[in-house]
Amino acid sequence: MHALFGEGMFAAAGARRHADWRLDALGVMQLVTEDPRGWSRRVLGPEGGIYGSGPNGPFGAVTHNDFIGAFPVARRGAEQIMDTLQGEWFQANDIPDFHEREAELTGHAKAILARFGEDALFFTNAVSARNNPHADMFRREGVYEGFTDHVMDCGVIAVSATEVGIFWGFTID
């Protein structure tokens, strides 16, 4: 997980306890749930500080209604978005040595998302997925429905029958 998530990144998972996955996603976003598998979280702010839980975290103001800005995305698109979180403004062409690193980054993304199983659903705030969940997320527009007060944020929500994962990046300027 450390290869994909460094400074300015959020990676955490929690158990599904509600029929409405959004409630579980809120718990993960606010760091009030534990990972049922004991995986470590990565919640480092853009300046390297550690985010707090609840209202002190990056998703502290998110409500159930904000998930209207979460669009279904295919597994391949979710993998691509997780890769692009490494780049400035969350674009593949902004990742240093991307063409040499693409297979490695995608392998890490696949391994993380595999935990959610074959039947998992994925969501993103990348607007390119709004009308086409199978869009090439390496070549998407850099437009996002923001979930935080940061200048820009982008990420993937993974939802299975038993778990929810939040994998997100933040830009502060």
Image (tube, helix red, strand yellow):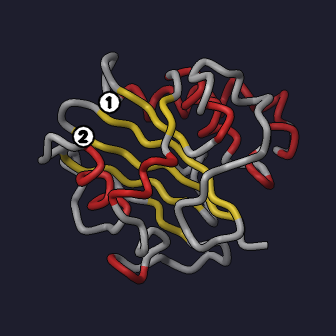
At x 47% / y 36%, what residue is drawn? 123
The image position of residue 64, as x and y in percent, is: 33, 58
Instruction: Identify the residue position indicated by label 2 in the image.
Output: 163
Q: Amino acid at mark 2?
A: Glu
Q: Quadrant of the C terminus?
A: bottom right
In the depicted view, which residue is nearer to us: 32 or 123?
123
Q: Amino acid at mark 1?
A: Phe
> In the picture, residue 157 is in which quadrant?
top left
Label 2 sits on a secondary structure element that is: strand
Q: Are marks 1 and 2 in contact (CB under 8 Å)?
A: yes
Judge left or right: residue 75 versus residue 120.
Answer: right
Vertically, is 50 above or below 70? below
Label 1 sits on a secondary structure element that is: loop
The image position of residue 111, as x and y in percent, is: 46, 29
Give me the C-alpha separation between circle 1 and circle 2.
7 Å
Q: Which mark is residue 116?
A: 1
Judge left or right: residue 1 versus residue 19.
Answer: right
Judge left or right: residue 37 versus residue 98.
Answer: left
In the depicted view, which residue is nearer to us: 136 or 34?
136
In the depicted view, which residue is nearer to us: 130 or 17?
130
Could you classify mark 2 by the number of other residues whose Cα lies within 10 Å: few (under 14), some (14-19), or many (20 or more)?
many
